[in-house]
């Protein structure tokens, strides 16, 4: 029975690994198959611009070996839209093995892909973590993808009062794809320690939501605010400098209404919040920007427990990142 189910549902066996749409001489679709070999003789290739058949005697090895389909393997010319389109591979019995779409844009790495630039390809980034596509300036049709270039976030961590670089500051980056609480807290997604010049650098894999959260910590300094960075596919190098202030300096703006402190942080489950009483509420969000809790500004303080994870506590122009390791949502 198990074998019959496998044979009756072949579609998941194949997937698109790389896509090239321009120039016309480079048009093609690289696919891989889980099993194989596959006799593609007479199979139909359909795009938004053409329908043609695979030539007789074309064998795809399978077993995850990349196989490049272009006009040389087809009875007619392969044509792919330069900015958007689809690709279907249909066997002689009418079963669809691949049904793939691509679309305009340059800021998304969601499954499927944006159309790659002229002379580039859209390559499947399969590193065991991310199953999305990235823009590849060095196409490798028929060969394994050269997943070498990624986003790079770099910068310098400095003392906010003196401007001096901080040696040994720990810089953390979370990708908002990975929002399971246990994964957000331990281990962190990306991490680096600054050198004597305060410099840090991290290579970041493509993400589904294209948003990274970054902050820094150092002995003797208060936590930095958490910043959000938008990243696009790959080949993007982003400079992001961070300033830390000595511990105990909780108000830097000169506006008492923006005072807000959270402790202990990280917390084993219970957070103590203290702020300047006033009309502005204290809002708590998860890392995806969803509202979790709102506290009346007139309270001035509260003790809360939340589900494990990373949260942003905001009031006015002040934002504090809080990490909770365990607990159940409540307010005391």
Image: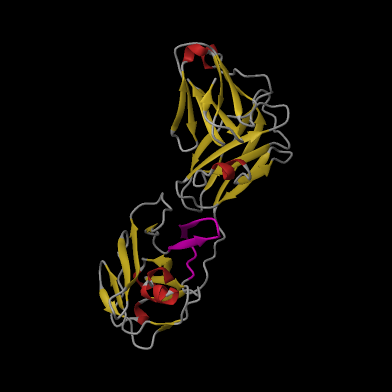
Q: Position of residue 57 (x, y in %)?
A: 38, 88
- The way the protein has been coloured in the rendering is secondary structure
User: Residue 248's spot in the image, x, y percent?
Assistant: 68, 19
Residue at the limit of the structure toward the front, as seen here = 1
On screen, residue 192 above or below 68: above
Query: How many marks do you count on the picture?
Result: 0
On screen, 295 above or below 229? above
User: Does the stretch in magenta take in 307?
Assistant: no
Query: With respect to residue 135, does 323 lie above or below?
Result: above
Determine the residue positioned at 59% across, 17% down. Answer: 251
The magenta segment: 120-140
User: In what quadrant of the picture does the N terminus appear?
Assistant: bottom left
Residue 321 falls left or right of residue 5: right
Quarter of the C terminus within the rendering: top right
Residue 52: image quadrant is: bottom left
Q: Is residue 251 left or right of residue 117?
A: right
- Work out which residue is located at the far bottom of the displayed protein and give it: 57
User: Where is residue 146, by image quadrant?
Assistant: bottom right
Left or right, residue 86 beside residue 227 = left
Q: Could you say which is closer to the camera, residue 1 or residue 215?
A: 1
Residues 41 and 156: in front is: 41
Residue at 59% from the left image edge and 19% from the top image edge: 252
Q: Residue drawn 32% across and 80% down?
A: 43
Magenta stretch holds residue 135:
yes
Q: Position of residue 126 (x, y in %)?
A: 52, 61
| Residue 263: x %, y % from top left | 63, 24
């Amino acid at each position: 029975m198990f074998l019959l189910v496998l044979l009756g549902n072949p579609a998941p066996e194949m997937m698109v690994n790389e896509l090239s749409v321009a120039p016309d001489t480079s048009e093609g679709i690289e696919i891989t198959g889980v099993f194989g070999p596959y006799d593609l003789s007479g199979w139909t290739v359909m795009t938004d611009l053409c329908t043609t058949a695979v030539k007789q005697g074309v064998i795809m090895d399978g077993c995850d070996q990349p196989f490049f389909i272009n006009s040389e393997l087809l009875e007619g010319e392969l044509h792919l839209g330069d900015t958007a389109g689809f690709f279907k591979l249909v066997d002689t019995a009418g079963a669809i093995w691949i049904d793939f779409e691509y679309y305009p844009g340059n800021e998304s790495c969601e499954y499927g892909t944006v159309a790659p630039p002229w002379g580039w390809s859209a390559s499947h980034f399969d590193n065991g973590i991310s199953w999305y596509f990235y823009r590849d300036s060095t196409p490798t049709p028929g060969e394994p993808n050269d997943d070498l270039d990624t986003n790079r976030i770099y910068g310098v961590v400095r003392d906010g009062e003196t401007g001096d670089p901080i040696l040994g500051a720990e810089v953390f980056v979370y990708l908002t794809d990975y929002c399971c609480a246990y994964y957000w807290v331990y281990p962190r997604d990306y991490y680096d320690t600054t050198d004597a010049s305060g410099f840090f650098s991290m290579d970041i894999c493509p993400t589904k939501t294209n948003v990274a959260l970054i902050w820094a910590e150092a002995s003797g300094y208060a936590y930095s605010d958490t910043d959000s960075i938008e990243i696009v596919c790959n080949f993007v190098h982003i400079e992001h400098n961070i300033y830390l202030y000595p511990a105990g300096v909780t108000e830097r703006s000169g506006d008492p209404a923006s005072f807000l402190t959270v402790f202990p942080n990280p917390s084993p489950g219970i957070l103590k919040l203290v702020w300047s009483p006033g009309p502005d509420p204290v809002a708590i969000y998860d890392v995806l920007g969803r509202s979790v809790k709102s506290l009346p500004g007139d309270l001035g303080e509260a003790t809360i427990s939340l589900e494990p994870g990373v949260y942003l506590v905001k009031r006015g122009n002040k934002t504090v990142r809080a990490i909770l390791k365990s607990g159940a949502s409540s307010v005391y």
